[in-house]
Amino acid sequence: MSKISDYCIIGSNILVGKNVTIWHWVQVREDAVIGDDVVIAKGCYIGKGVHIGSRTRIQNNVSIFEGAVIDEDVFIGPHVCFTNDKYPPSEACPEVTIVGKGASIGANSTILPGVVIGKCAVIGAGAVVTKSVPAGEVWVGNPARKMMR
């Protein structure tokens, strides 16, 4: 059974899976798809048509704008912002940003439009991701770069 706070704004034509929890002051725009066992914490914005895969955890105050596709088992830390327009204010269609299965994005990161974050990749806290991140890699910094081990 899903738990959706009375203090959210939920748009039309939303698909919500089983056992979803949506906390206070969340806005979910029309045509969004939210998989099973997803938790969306307080103060988040989920844009029009955004897809969120099952078992994903979205922490407080995350903004996921139109054009984002989040796969299953993803962790998104507090205050992460997904952008969707390289040249605002444009009237162009938003660019698609994809986060692969099992990826983890640290707090206060900014994800620029059109990037792909690969399966099981890790984005360090505060990173600014300006280009695609291959699967399994750890990227940190501003602009984000592969962390050498």
Image (cartoon, rainbow, N blue to C red):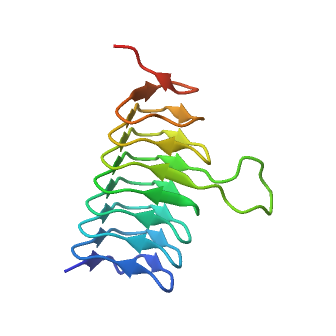
Look at 44% across and 34% down and name the residue there.
Answer: 134
Foreground of the two, 121 or 5: 121
Q: Quadrant of residue 77?
A: top left
Residue situated furthest top in the rendering = 149
Is 59 situated left or right of 51 in this image? left
Q: Considering the image in quadrants, where does the C terminus appear? A: top left
Residue 24 vs 137, above or below: the answer is below
Residue 93 vs 16, above or below: the answer is above
Residue 107, image x and y in percent? 41, 40
Residue 93 vs 76, above or below: the answer is below
Residue situated furthest right in the rendering = 90
Look at 48% across and 34% down and name the residue there.
Answer: 133
Residue 29, image x and y in percent? 53, 74
Foreground of the two, 102 or 16: 102
Look at 47% across and 39% down and name the residue there.
Answer: 108
Look at 32% across and 69% down and name the residue there.
Answer: 35
Is 31 situated left or right of 15 in this image? right
Q: Quadrant of residue 8?
A: bottom left
Residue 69, image x and y in percent? 47, 59
Residue 65, image x and y in percent? 57, 60
Residue 44 vs 2, above or below: the answer is above
Q: Considering the image in quadrants, where does the N terminus appear? A: bottom left
